[in-house]
Image (tube, helix red, strand yellow):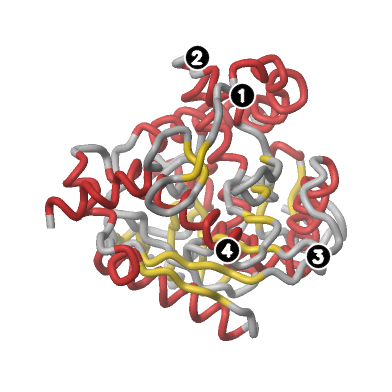
Amino acid sequence: MKVLLRNPRREIEVAGPITVTALLQRLDLIPEAVLVIAGDELVARDARLDDATTVEIRPVTSGGAPTR
Amino acid sequence: MKCTVCRGPAVIDVRRHNAAFCPEHFTVHGRDQVGRAIHDHDMLRPDDRVLVAVSGGKDSLALWDLLAALGVEADGLHLRLGIGDYSDESTVAARAYATAHGRTMHEVDLAADWGFTVPEAAHATHRVPCSACGLSKRHLFNTYAVDHGYDVVATGHNLDDEAAVLLGNVLRWETEYLARQQPVLPAAPGFARKVKPLVRLGERELAAYCVIRRIDYQVEECPMAAGNRHLTYKDLLNGLEHRSPGTKAAFLHGFFERGQDRFAGDDAAGTLRRCAECGAPTPSEVCAFCRLRARAAERT
């Protein structure tokens, strides 16, 4: 399946089917720091992604100027 | 995974609440958390005129949307920071939301209105860009609110932001900053009230809220923030949260409930006067924003 990653933006291929949890483990990503989106929809950690799916792994951490 | 509320298919889990939600009930969860923060910290009163600081990112757009869902009709203020394509794309996202939802959004352009951009100010002061950016935002959001009759400035600082700031302040025992780290800063002469209604929601929840609500936000990270200390603290806290869900919320809300008032005596704001340049309250003859503007002007 095609997997879109960001910061920097890039695309990789990962063999499916695979669960969201296993995909994040394979990519060494902490689930707390990302969303997984298949098509336009959020998918839960136990969802199974097949080879035809296009997946975006979207980081959620933003870190501009903190306020004191 | 099933929705904790309706047992339908869940799209997101919130481990610190030991819960999972379908899109509909996740939206309710977001509203409940913001409503509870507003209530618990007495953030808003019925007749308040509210100004939302709108960057075009997930937090500020989710905040604007959640406030409206709770019946708070707020206007927006967007600052154009001059950080290349990143700022341009952020402005597009902010304008698109305002237009699509029929909201009033004011804009201030640092370059056109004040003669400098964030990268120029950072270069002129030899400080990290986030410092010039934060200083400009704090000054301009407050000044705009005071000058235009808004009672409250609402910002999109979330649970992760505030927990990371708290960690940084504790690691260095910045007691003055700890004294001022509150979800509400009351109004004072020359200052609008500042409120942070998202302190009960993490940034993963806010990004998920935007995806579910089909709110297009600026997804790319600010190019000037890469590698800053604040992001390092967030990474560390996410690692803790992964092993022990609820750690961030316990850290932050425990501080608000049982720790913050212990530092009240360390808030050394001192006597304020009016800035000789712009009239804003300041402990110095010229406020920090006007000094920043002058240094940037010297270099351009």
Determine the CA span between mark 2 and mark 1.
11 Å
The quadrant in which residue B12 appears is bottom right
Determine the CA span between mark 2 and mark 3.
37 Å
Q: Position of residue B23 (x, y in %)?
A: 72, 66
The quadrant in which residue B29 appears is bottom right
Q: Of label 2 and label 1, which has the lower sequence position?
A: 2
Evaluate whether residue B268 shows in this view: yes
Where does label 3 land, which residue?
A: B70
Where does label 2 land, which residue?
A: B173
> In the orientation shown, which residue stands out farthest toward the left?
B299
Residue at 60%, 31% in the rendered image = B181
Residue at 72%, 59% in the rendered image = B10
Q: Position of residue B173 (x, y in %)?
A: 50, 14
- Which dot, 1 or 3, sits closer to the camera? 1
Determine the CA span between mark 1 and mark 3.
30 Å
Q: Secondary structure at mark 1?
A: helix
Determine the CA span between mark 3 and mark 4.
26 Å
Give the camera-side residue of B190 and A19: B190
Where does label 4 land, which residue?
A: B147
Left or right: where does residue B244 sit relative to residue B17?
left
- B267 over B232 or under it: above or below: above
Where does label 1 land, which residue?
A: B179
Q: Of label 4 and label 1, which has the lower sequence position?
A: 4
